[in-house]
């Protein structure tokens, strides 16, 4: 009964370091999304994918890259971390875009020093 | 881009009181969703609304999809301590070009005093 699993749960980076956040879903969902959550701003879409091998930019894509090599996995990369990227990152997935609700992971809390 | 205004930003209530929160948008949405987020966890879906004017209940929760398709409200009746958390509204556009993308409100932080 895993649903959407995010790893790691916590991470502290120094400015300029790189890292990859992993999202895995076991519901055979086509659509996957990466959001960041900052105080008072709700969740903002970074990138999304409508299927294996496809990715697209969301509302706040700058400084991030993504890959969807396998249907069940959606990776979010930070090539050169900046303090402004300190946030809580959430991955979500949904079966389709026809009004299907998105299911969220428990988040990755990332701090950039 | 599309924006959702959610209010109030926070609420402090006594156990047993009813709660009401709402979201308004400058754009039309085809689907309205209400999520709850507990500390350290991701948002969990509470109610989904698919038709203008639709009124849907889930236990003590009731939500409505505004007739103009630009607003929605969520009511919680007889609040209990476990209702504490952050409540988010989210609007979803039509399929095709929107790819199911959600636009989130800023959230309502609910505190319930026993």
Image: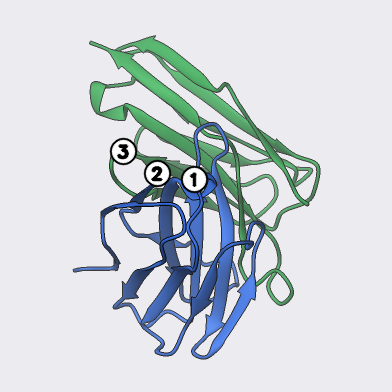
Chain colours: A blue, B green
Residue closer to the observer: A42 or B29: A42
Q: Residue B38, which numbered label? A: 3
A55 sits left or right of A72 in the view: right
Q: Name the chain letter of the residue that bears numbered label 3.
A: B
Residue B107 in the image: above or below residue B18: below
Instruction: Indicate which disc, 2 or 1, sits on the residue closer to the N terminus.
Output: 1
Query: Where is residue A87 shown, x and y percent of the image?
Result: 44, 46
Badges 2 and 1: C-beta atoms under 8 Å apart? Answer: yes
Spatial CA distance of label 2 from label 1 is 6 Å
Mark 1 lies on residue: A83
Label 2: state its secondary structure: loop
Q: Chain of mark 1?
A: A
Mark 3, Cα crowd under 10 Å, few <14 / some 14-19 / many 20+, is some
Q: Residue B78 at x, y = what percent?
A: 34, 19
Viewer-proximal residue among A83 and A37: A83
| Extreme-left residue of the structure | A1
Circle 1 packing at 10 Å, graded few (<14), some (14-19), many (20+), is some
Which disc is residue A113 wearing? 2
> Which residue occupies 57% across, 61% down?
A46
Whether A84 is drawn above or below A22: the answer is above
- Where in the figure is residue A1, as x and y percent of width and height? 19, 69
Q: Is residue B3 above or below residue A36?
A: above
Instruction: Classify residue B35 by image quadrant.
Output: top left
* Residue A35 horizontal side relative to residue A9, left or right: right
Gap in angstroms between the C-alphas marked 2 and 3: 26 Å
Name the subunit of mark 2.
A
**Disc 3/disc 1 C-alpha distance (Å):** 25 Å
Check disc 2: other Cα within 10 Å, few if <14, some if 14-19, many if 20+: some
Q: For the point 35% across and 31% down, which residue is it?
A: B85
Front: mark 3 or 1: 1
């Amino acid at each position: 009964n895993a649903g959407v699993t995010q790893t790691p749960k916590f991470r502290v980076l120094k400015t300029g370091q790189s890292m990859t956040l992993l999202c895995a879903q076991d519901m055979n969902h086509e659509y996957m999304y990466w959001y960041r959550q900052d105080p008072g701003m709700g969740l903002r879409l970074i990138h999304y994918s409508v299927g294996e091998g496809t990715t697209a930019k969301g509302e706040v894509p700058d400084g991030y890259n993504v890959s969807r090599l396998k249907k069940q996995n959606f990776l979010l990369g930070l090539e050169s971390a900046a303090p402004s990227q300190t946030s809580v990152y959430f991955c979500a997935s949904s079966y389709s875009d026809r009004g299907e609700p998105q299911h969220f992971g428990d988040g990755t809390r990332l701090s950039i020093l | 881009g599309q924006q959702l205004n959610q209010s109030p930003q926070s609420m402090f209530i006594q156990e047993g009181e009813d709660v009401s929160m709402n979201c308004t948008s400058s754009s039309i949405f085809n689907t309205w969703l209400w999520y709850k987020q507990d500390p350290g966890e991701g948002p969990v879906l509470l109610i989904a609304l698919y038709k203008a004017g639709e009124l849907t209940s889930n236990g003590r929760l009731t939500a409505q999809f505004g007739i103009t398709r630009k607003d929605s409200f969520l009511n919680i009746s007889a609040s209990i301590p476990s209702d504490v958390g952050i409540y988010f509204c989210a609007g979803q556009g039509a399929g095709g070009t929107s790819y199911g993308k959600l636009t989130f409100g800023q959230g309502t932080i609910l505190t319930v005093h026993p």
